[in-house]
Image (cartoon, rainbow, N blue to C red):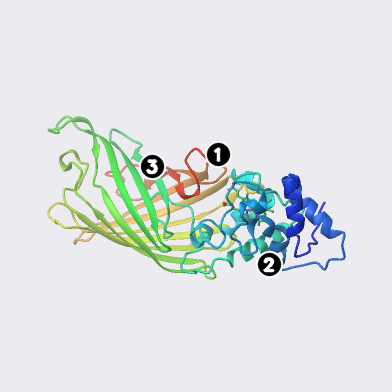
Amino acid sequence: MVIRRFRPHPAGCGKTLLSAGILLLLPVLCSAAVSEEEATAPKTGRELYLAACAACHGADGRGQPQSMVGFDLPLPDFADSSFISREPREDWVAVSQLGGPVRRFSELMPSFKGVLTTDESRRIVSYIHSFNQDKSWPAGEHNLPRPLVTEKAFPEDEVVFSASGDLEGSGSIAGKFIYEKRLGSRNQLEVVIPYAWSERGAQDPVSGWHSGVGDIALALKRAFYHSLDRGTIFSAAAEFKLPTGDERRGFGKGTPVLEPFALFGQILPSDFFLQAQAGMEIPLNTDKAGTEAFLRAAFGRSFSAANWGRTFSPMVELLAARELEAGARTHWDIVPQMQVTLSRRQHIMMNFGVRLPLNDTSTRSTQFIVYLLWDWFDGGFFEGW
Ligand code: HEC
Protein backbone atom coordinates (compact mmCIF):
# COMPACT_ATOMS: atom_id res chain seq x y z
CA MET A 1 0.00 0.00 0.00
CA VAL A 2 1.53 3.29 -1.05
CA ILE A 3 -0.40 6.31 0.04
CA ARG A 4 1.43 9.43 -0.77
CA ARG A 5 -1.16 12.09 -0.21
CA PHE A 6 -1.10 14.06 2.99
CA ARG A 7 -2.83 17.07 4.32
CA PRO A 8 -0.47 19.49 6.03
CA HIS A 9 -2.33 19.61 9.38
CA PRO A 10 -2.93 16.19 10.85
CA ALA A 11 -1.67 17.16 14.31
CA GLY A 12 -5.19 16.70 15.62
CA CYS A 13 -5.37 13.30 14.02
CA GLY A 14 -2.07 12.37 15.67
CA LYS A 15 -3.28 13.44 19.08
CA THR A 16 -6.52 11.49 18.94
CA LEU A 17 -4.74 8.37 17.85
CA LEU A 18 -2.02 8.77 20.43
CA SER A 19 -4.48 9.01 23.24
CA ALA A 20 -6.19 5.93 21.84
CA GLY A 21 -2.84 4.18 22.28
CA ILE A 22 -2.37 2.91 18.73
CA LEU A 23 0.93 4.60 18.24
CA LEU A 24 2.48 2.25 15.79
CA LEU A 25 -0.36 2.52 13.34
CA LEU A 26 -0.30 6.29 13.50
CA PRO A 27 1.38 7.05 10.15
CA VAL A 28 -0.75 4.53 8.28
CA LEU A 29 -4.00 5.59 9.83
CA CYS A 30 -3.34 9.31 9.59
CA SER A 31 -2.42 9.08 5.94
CA ALA A 32 -5.33 6.80 5.17
CA ALA A 33 -7.65 9.31 6.84
CA VAL A 34 -6.33 12.25 4.89
CA SER A 35 -5.97 10.44 1.60
CA GLU A 36 -9.69 9.91 1.38
CA GLU A 37 -10.25 13.65 1.34
CA GLU A 38 -9.81 15.89 -1.63
CA ALA A 39 -6.31 16.87 -0.53
CA THR A 40 -3.91 18.40 -2.97
CA ALA A 41 -0.73 16.36 -3.01
CA PRO A 42 1.87 18.26 -0.99
CA LYS A 43 5.35 18.00 -2.31
CA THR A 44 7.80 19.91 -0.22
CA GLY A 45 9.75 18.42 2.63
CA ARG A 46 8.10 20.95 4.91
CA GLU A 47 4.57 19.90 3.99
CA LEU A 48 5.43 16.24 4.37
CA TYR A 49 7.13 16.92 7.70
CA LEU A 50 4.12 18.80 9.06
CA ALA A 51 1.84 16.02 7.91
CA ALA A 52 3.80 12.99 9.09
CA CYS A 53 6.27 14.04 11.78
CA ALA A 54 5.20 17.25 13.50
CA ALA A 55 2.56 15.52 15.68
CA CYS A 56 5.46 14.16 17.74
CA HIS A 57 8.50 16.19 16.69
CA GLY A 58 6.72 19.58 16.76
CA ALA A 59 6.39 22.11 13.95
CA ASP A 60 9.65 23.69 15.15
CA GLY A 61 11.47 20.34 15.35
CA ARG A 62 12.12 20.65 19.07
CA GLY A 63 9.72 17.86 20.06
CA GLN A 64 6.19 18.11 21.42
CA PRO A 65 5.82 18.18 25.22
CA GLN A 66 5.23 14.83 26.93
CA SER A 67 1.70 15.89 27.82
CA MET A 68 0.87 16.14 24.10
CA VAL A 69 2.46 12.93 22.86
CA GLY A 70 1.43 10.74 25.76
CA PHE A 71 4.79 9.01 26.33
CA ASP A 72 7.77 9.75 28.58
CA LEU A 73 10.60 9.12 26.14
CA PRO A 74 12.23 12.48 25.40
CA LEU A 75 12.01 13.51 21.74
CA PRO A 76 15.17 14.65 20.00
CA ASP A 77 15.73 18.36 19.36
CA PHE A 78 16.23 18.80 15.61
CA ALA A 79 17.23 22.44 16.13
CA ASP A 80 20.25 21.32 18.19
CA SER A 81 23.21 21.73 15.80
CA SER A 82 25.38 19.40 17.83
CA PHE A 83 22.83 16.58 17.59
CA ILE A 84 21.80 17.00 13.97
CA SER A 85 25.28 17.17 12.45
CA ARG A 86 26.71 13.85 13.64
CA GLU A 87 25.84 11.32 10.98
CA PRO A 88 24.92 11.43 7.27
CA ARG A 89 21.33 12.31 6.41
CA GLU A 90 20.77 8.91 4.89
CA ASP A 91 20.89 7.48 8.42
CA TRP A 92 17.77 9.42 9.27
CA VAL A 93 16.12 8.39 6.02
CA ALA A 94 16.62 4.84 7.33
CA VAL A 95 14.98 5.72 10.67
CA SER A 96 12.12 7.49 8.91
CA GLN A 97 11.50 4.57 6.54
CA LEU A 98 11.98 1.65 8.92
CA GLY A 99 11.26 3.23 12.30
CA GLY A 100 13.41 3.58 15.44
CA PRO A 101 14.27 -0.14 15.77
CA VAL A 102 16.41 -0.12 12.58
CA ARG A 103 19.02 1.75 14.64
CA ARG A 104 17.85 0.23 17.93
CA PHE A 105 15.91 3.32 18.94
CA SER A 106 12.49 3.04 20.48
CA GLU A 107 9.60 1.69 18.43
CA LEU A 108 7.73 4.83 19.51
CA MET A 109 9.50 6.23 16.46
CA PRO A 110 7.24 4.56 13.85
CA SER A 111 8.09 3.14 10.45
CA PHE A 112 6.78 5.09 7.45
CA LYS A 113 7.55 2.40 4.93
CA GLY A 114 4.70 2.17 2.44
CA VAL A 115 3.42 5.56 3.60
CA LEU A 116 6.30 7.71 2.47
CA THR A 117 8.55 6.88 -0.44
CA THR A 118 12.30 6.91 0.18
CA ASP A 119 12.45 10.07 -1.87
CA GLU A 120 9.82 11.72 0.32
CA SER A 121 11.76 10.69 3.44
CA ARG A 122 14.87 12.27 1.91
CA ARG A 123 12.96 15.53 1.33
CA ILE A 124 11.72 15.50 4.93
CA VAL A 125 15.19 14.84 6.31
CA SER A 126 16.49 17.74 4.21
CA TYR A 127 13.80 19.94 5.68
CA ILE A 128 14.63 18.76 9.22
CA HIS A 129 18.20 19.95 8.60
CA SER A 130 16.89 23.47 7.95
CA PHE A 131 16.02 23.67 11.68
CA ASN A 132 19.74 23.77 12.29
CA GLN A 133 20.68 27.41 11.88
CA ASP A 134 24.31 27.22 12.98
CA LYS A 135 26.26 26.38 9.84
CA SER A 136 29.62 26.27 11.59
CA TRP A 137 29.06 22.56 12.41
CA PRO A 138 30.47 20.36 9.63
CA ALA A 139 27.69 18.15 8.21
CA GLY A 140 27.58 14.48 9.27
CA GLU A 141 28.34 13.45 5.67
CA HIS A 142 31.95 14.54 6.28
CA ASN A 143 32.16 11.90 9.00
CA LEU A 144 33.89 9.38 6.71
CA PRO A 145 35.03 5.90 7.83
CA ARG A 146 38.19 6.06 9.90
CA PRO A 147 41.23 4.54 8.16
CA LEU A 148 43.75 2.51 10.20
CA VAL A 149 46.58 5.05 10.02
CA THR A 150 45.43 8.27 8.34
CA GLU A 151 43.58 10.54 10.76
CA LYS A 152 40.13 11.96 10.04
CA ALA A 153 39.39 15.61 9.34
CA PHE A 154 35.96 15.42 11.02
CA PRO A 155 35.95 16.35 14.73
CA GLU A 156 34.62 13.39 16.71
CA ASP A 157 33.42 12.14 20.05
CA GLU A 158 34.83 8.65 20.04
CA VAL A 159 37.02 6.07 21.70
CA VAL A 160 39.33 3.83 19.67
CA PHE A 161 41.32 0.80 20.84
CA SER A 162 43.89 -0.24 18.30
CA ALA A 163 46.55 -2.92 18.13
CA SER A 164 49.30 -3.62 15.64
CA GLY A 165 52.15 -6.06 15.46
CA ASP A 166 54.61 -7.85 13.22
CA LEU A 167 53.27 -10.82 11.31
CA GLU A 168 56.75 -12.33 10.99
CA GLY A 169 59.36 -13.28 13.59
CA SER A 170 59.57 -12.09 17.15
CA GLY A 171 58.65 -8.52 17.64
CA SER A 172 56.20 -6.38 19.44
CA ILE A 173 52.54 -5.59 19.78
CA ALA A 174 51.63 -1.96 20.07
CA GLY A 175 48.26 -1.01 21.49
CA LYS A 176 46.69 2.43 21.61
CA PHE A 177 43.81 3.85 23.54
CA ILE A 178 42.53 7.01 21.85
CA TYR A 179 39.95 9.29 23.41
CA GLU A 180 38.46 12.06 21.28
CA LYS A 181 36.18 14.77 22.57
CA ARG A 182 34.52 17.42 20.52
CA LEU A 183 34.75 20.99 21.77
CA GLY A 184 32.02 23.08 20.16
CA SER A 185 31.34 22.95 16.44
CA ARG A 186 34.82 22.69 14.97
CA ASN A 187 37.36 21.66 17.60
CA GLN A 188 38.40 18.33 19.01
CA LEU A 189 40.65 17.34 21.88
CA GLU A 190 42.46 14.02 21.68
CA VAL A 191 44.39 11.97 24.20
CA VAL A 192 46.44 8.99 23.02
CA ILE A 193 47.79 6.43 25.48
CA PRO A 194 50.03 3.88 23.75
CA TYR A 195 50.83 0.55 25.36
CA ALA A 196 53.37 -1.92 24.06
CA TRP A 197 54.56 -5.48 24.57
CA SER A 198 57.90 -6.17 23.01
CA GLU A 199 60.56 -8.83 22.98
CA ARG A 200 64.21 -7.83 23.19
CA GLY A 201 66.92 -10.15 21.89
CA ALA A 202 69.20 -12.22 24.20
CA GLN A 203 72.19 -9.95 23.61
CA ASP A 204 70.16 -6.97 24.79
CA PRO A 205 70.86 -5.91 28.42
CA VAL A 206 67.09 -5.99 29.00
CA SER A 207 66.25 -9.20 27.11
CA GLY A 208 62.89 -11.01 27.16
CA TRP A 209 59.32 -9.73 26.92
CA HIS A 210 58.50 -6.33 28.36
CA SER A 211 55.41 -4.24 28.48
CA GLY A 212 54.81 -0.63 29.28
CA VAL A 213 53.12 2.65 28.49
CA GLY A 214 54.57 4.59 25.56
CA ASP A 215 54.71 8.31 24.90
CA ILE A 216 51.33 9.77 25.86
CA ALA A 217 50.10 12.37 23.37
CA LEU A 218 47.68 15.28 23.53
CA ALA A 219 46.28 16.82 20.37
CA LEU A 220 44.02 19.66 19.33
CA LYS A 221 42.27 19.64 15.97
CA ARG A 222 40.17 22.29 14.25
CA ALA A 223 38.05 22.05 11.09
CA PHE A 224 38.89 25.27 9.23
CA TYR A 225 36.84 24.68 6.13
CA HIS A 226 33.90 22.48 5.23
CA SER A 227 31.37 22.55 2.42
CA LEU A 228 28.73 19.93 1.83
CA ASP A 229 28.16 21.22 -1.72
CA ARG A 230 31.78 20.54 -2.58
CA GLY A 231 31.98 17.50 -0.27
CA THR A 232 35.21 18.86 1.19
CA ILE A 233 36.48 19.22 4.75
CA PHE A 234 39.86 20.58 5.73
CA SER A 235 41.35 20.58 9.26
CA ALA A 236 44.63 21.27 10.98
CA ALA A 237 45.96 19.76 14.18
CA ALA A 238 48.89 19.85 16.55
CA GLU A 239 49.89 16.88 18.66
CA PHE A 240 52.33 16.97 21.54
CA LYS A 241 53.95 13.70 22.61
CA LEU A 242 55.36 13.56 26.13
CA PRO A 243 58.36 11.30 26.83
CA THR A 244 56.43 9.11 29.27
CA GLY A 245 57.56 5.81 27.72
CA ASP A 246 60.63 3.87 28.84
CA GLU A 247 63.13 4.66 26.10
CA ARG A 248 65.53 1.89 27.22
CA ARG A 249 62.91 -0.75 26.47
CA GLY A 250 61.94 0.86 23.19
CA PHE A 251 58.60 2.26 24.39
CA GLY A 252 59.38 5.92 23.87
CA LYS A 253 61.60 8.34 22.03
CA GLY A 254 63.03 9.92 25.15
CA THR A 255 62.21 13.40 23.96
CA PRO A 256 59.06 15.49 23.66
CA VAL A 257 57.85 15.49 20.07
CA LEU A 258 55.72 18.10 18.36
CA GLU A 259 53.60 16.90 15.46
CA PRO A 260 51.74 19.47 13.35
CA PHE A 261 49.60 18.07 10.54
CA ALA A 262 46.87 18.94 8.05
CA LEU A 263 43.83 16.77 7.26
CA PHE A 264 41.61 16.56 4.24
CA GLY A 265 38.41 14.64 3.50
CA GLN A 266 36.61 14.51 0.17
CA ILE A 267 33.26 12.87 -0.54
CA LEU A 268 33.27 11.45 -4.07
CA PRO A 269 30.33 10.26 -6.21
CA SER A 270 28.79 6.80 -5.57
CA ASP A 271 29.88 6.62 -1.90
CA PHE A 272 33.58 6.74 -2.74
CA PHE A 273 35.80 8.92 -0.57
CA LEU A 274 39.35 10.17 -0.23
CA GLN A 275 41.13 11.21 2.96
CA ALA A 276 44.64 12.57 3.42
CA GLN A 277 46.99 13.65 6.15
CA ALA A 278 50.34 15.44 5.81
CA GLY A 279 52.60 16.46 8.65
CA MET A 280 55.91 16.44 10.46
CA GLU A 281 57.27 14.83 13.61
CA ILE A 282 59.64 17.28 15.24
CA PRO A 283 61.57 15.99 18.28
CA LEU A 284 62.61 18.75 20.66
CA ASN A 285 65.88 16.93 21.39
CA THR A 286 67.35 16.08 17.98
CA ASP A 287 70.04 13.84 19.52
CA LYS A 288 67.32 11.35 20.43
CA ALA A 289 65.34 11.24 17.17
CA GLY A 290 65.30 12.75 13.73
CA THR A 291 62.69 15.05 12.23
CA GLU A 292 60.37 13.14 9.96
CA ALA A 293 57.83 14.21 7.32
CA PHE A 294 54.89 12.00 6.40
CA LEU A 295 52.09 11.84 3.88
CA ARG A 296 49.13 9.45 4.19
CA ALA A 297 46.16 8.94 1.92
CA ALA A 298 43.15 6.63 2.11
CA PHE A 299 40.76 5.81 -0.70
CA GLY A 300 37.64 3.73 -0.18
CA ARG A 301 33.97 3.16 -0.64
CA SER A 302 31.06 2.36 1.68
CA PHE A 303 28.54 -0.36 0.88
CA SER A 304 25.41 -0.92 2.94
CA ALA A 305 23.61 -4.20 3.19
CA ALA A 306 19.98 -4.10 1.98
CA ASN A 307 17.57 -1.87 3.90
CA TRP A 308 20.19 0.32 5.55
CA GLY A 309 21.85 -2.65 7.24
CA ARG A 310 25.49 -3.23 8.16
CA THR A 311 27.99 -0.95 6.41
CA PHE A 312 31.22 -2.28 4.90
CA SER A 313 33.93 0.18 3.93
CA PRO A 314 36.88 -1.35 2.11
CA MET A 315 39.79 1.09 1.95
CA VAL A 316 43.38 1.18 0.86
CA GLU A 317 45.95 3.51 2.37
CA LEU A 318 49.22 4.64 0.90
CA LEU A 319 51.78 5.83 3.46
CA ALA A 320 55.03 7.68 2.88
CA ALA A 321 57.51 8.74 5.58
CA ARG A 322 60.98 10.20 5.30
CA GLU A 323 63.56 11.47 7.79
CA LEU A 324 64.53 15.01 6.89
CA GLU A 325 68.24 14.51 6.51
CA ALA A 326 70.53 14.16 3.51
CA GLY A 327 70.54 10.70 1.99
CA ALA A 328 67.47 9.42 3.88
CA ARG A 329 65.08 7.18 1.98
CA THR A 330 61.32 7.53 1.79
CA HIS A 331 59.54 4.52 3.26
CA TRP A 332 56.43 3.48 1.36
CA ASP A 333 53.68 1.25 2.73
CA ILE A 334 50.31 0.14 1.46
CA VAL A 335 47.49 -0.83 3.84
CA PRO A 336 44.48 -2.70 2.43
CA GLN A 337 41.73 -2.87 5.06
CA MET A 338 38.02 -3.31 5.75
CA GLN A 339 35.91 -1.36 8.21
CA VAL A 340 32.64 -2.97 9.32
CA THR A 341 29.88 -1.59 11.54
CA LEU A 342 29.15 -4.06 14.33
CA SER A 343 26.17 -2.59 16.19
CA ARG A 344 22.76 -1.83 14.63
CA ARG A 345 23.17 1.75 15.86
CA GLN A 346 26.36 1.75 13.75
CA HIS A 347 28.24 3.38 16.60
CA ILE A 348 30.57 0.42 17.20
CA MET A 349 32.85 -0.48 14.31
CA MET A 350 35.94 -2.46 13.67
CA ASN A 351 38.62 -2.23 11.05
CA PHE A 352 41.34 -4.72 10.20
CA GLY A 353 44.09 -4.72 7.65
CA VAL A 354 47.74 -5.35 6.92
CA ARG A 355 50.51 -2.84 6.49
CA LEU A 356 52.76 -4.01 3.66
CA PRO A 357 56.09 -2.25 3.19
CA LEU A 358 56.67 -1.48 -0.48
CA ASN A 359 60.42 -0.90 -0.11
CA ASP A 360 63.24 -1.74 2.36
CA THR A 361 61.45 -4.98 3.05
CA SER A 362 64.56 -6.55 4.59
CA THR A 363 64.37 -4.20 7.58
CA ARG A 364 60.61 -3.61 7.72
CA SER A 365 58.13 -6.40 8.19
CA THR A 366 54.46 -6.81 7.35
CA GLN A 367 52.18 -5.80 10.22
CA PHE A 368 48.58 -6.47 11.11
CA ILE A 369 46.53 -3.51 12.38
CA VAL A 370 43.06 -3.67 13.95
CA TYR A 371 40.86 -1.25 15.81
CA LEU A 372 37.58 -1.22 17.64
CA LEU A 373 35.84 2.14 17.53
CA TRP A 374 33.05 3.42 19.74
CA ASP A 375 31.19 6.60 18.75
CA TRP A 376 30.14 7.30 22.32
CA PHE A 377 27.94 10.27 21.47
CA ASP A 378 25.50 7.88 19.77
CA GLY A 379 24.99 5.67 22.80
CA GLY A 380 26.60 3.44 25.44
CA PHE A 381 28.89 0.60 24.40
CA PHE A 382 26.27 -2.03 25.21
CA GLU A 383 23.34 -0.03 23.84
CA GLY A 384 22.07 -0.18 20.27
CA TRP A 385 23.11 -3.77 19.32
C1 HEC B 1 4.50 8.79 17.17
C2 HEC B 1 5.43 9.83 17.35
C3 HEC B 1 6.45 10.06 16.26
C4 HEC B 1 6.23 10.38 14.94
C5 HEC B 1 4.90 10.57 14.24
C6 HEC B 1 7.54 10.55 14.35
N1 HEC B 1 8.51 10.31 15.27
FE1 HEC B 1 10.52 10.41 14.97
N2 HEC B 1 10.86 9.90 16.90
C7 HEC B 1 9.89 9.63 17.83
C8 HEC B 1 10.52 9.26 19.08
C9 HEC B 1 9.81 8.89 20.35
C10 HEC B 1 11.91 9.34 18.86
C11 HEC B 1 13.02 9.03 19.87
C12 HEC B 1 13.40 7.57 19.79
C13 HEC B 1 14.45 7.16 20.79
O1 HEC B 1 15.17 8.04 21.31
O2 HEC B 1 14.59 5.95 21.04
C14 HEC B 1 12.08 9.75 17.49
C15 HEC B 1 13.32 9.92 16.90
C16 HEC B 1 13.51 10.33 15.61
C17 HEC B 1 14.80 10.57 15.00
C18 HEC B 1 16.12 10.52 15.72
C19 HEC B 1 16.96 9.34 15.51
C20 HEC B 1 18.32 9.55 16.20
O3 HEC B 1 19.33 9.43 15.51
O4 HEC B 1 18.34 9.84 17.41
C21 HEC B 1 14.55 10.95 13.72
C22 HEC B 1 15.57 11.33 12.69
C23 HEC B 1 13.13 10.93 13.52
N3 HEC B 1 12.53 10.56 14.67
C24 HEC B 1 12.52 11.26 12.33
C25 HEC B 1 11.14 11.27 12.14
C26 HEC B 1 10.53 11.61 10.88
C27 HEC B 1 11.29 12.01 9.64
C28 HEC B 1 9.19 11.53 11.08
C29 HEC B 1 8.11 11.75 10.07
C30 HEC B 1 8.25 11.07 8.80
C31 HEC B 1 8.97 11.12 12.46
N4 HEC B 1 10.20 10.98 13.06
C32 HEC B 1 7.75 10.90 13.03
C33 HEC B 1 8.53 9.70 17.63
C34 HEC B 1 7.90 10.00 16.45
Find residue 107 and report its image quarter: top right
Q: Residue 209, how many percent across, how many down?
A: 23, 30
In the rendering, which numbered label is found on residue 46? Answer: 2
Single out the mark in the foreground, 1 or 2.
2
N-term-proximal mark, 3 vs 2: 2
Query: Which element type, helix, strand or loop, lies under badge 2?
Result: helix
* Residue 285 appearing in the image: yes
* Residue annotated with mark 3: 161
For the residue labelled by badge 1, is the local secondary structure a helix, a strand or a loop?
loop
Instruction: Give how far apart the Cα atoms at labels 1 and 2 are.
Output: 32 Å
Q: Nearer the viewer, residue 256 or 113?
A: 113
CB-based contact (under 8 Å), mark 3 and mark 1: no
Residue 150 appearing in the image: no
Amino acid type, residue under disc 1 in the picture: Trp
* Residue type, numbered disc 2: Arg
Q: Which residue is mark 1?
A: 385
Lower sequence index among marks 1 and 2: 2
Kindly identify which numbered label has been placed on residue 207.
none
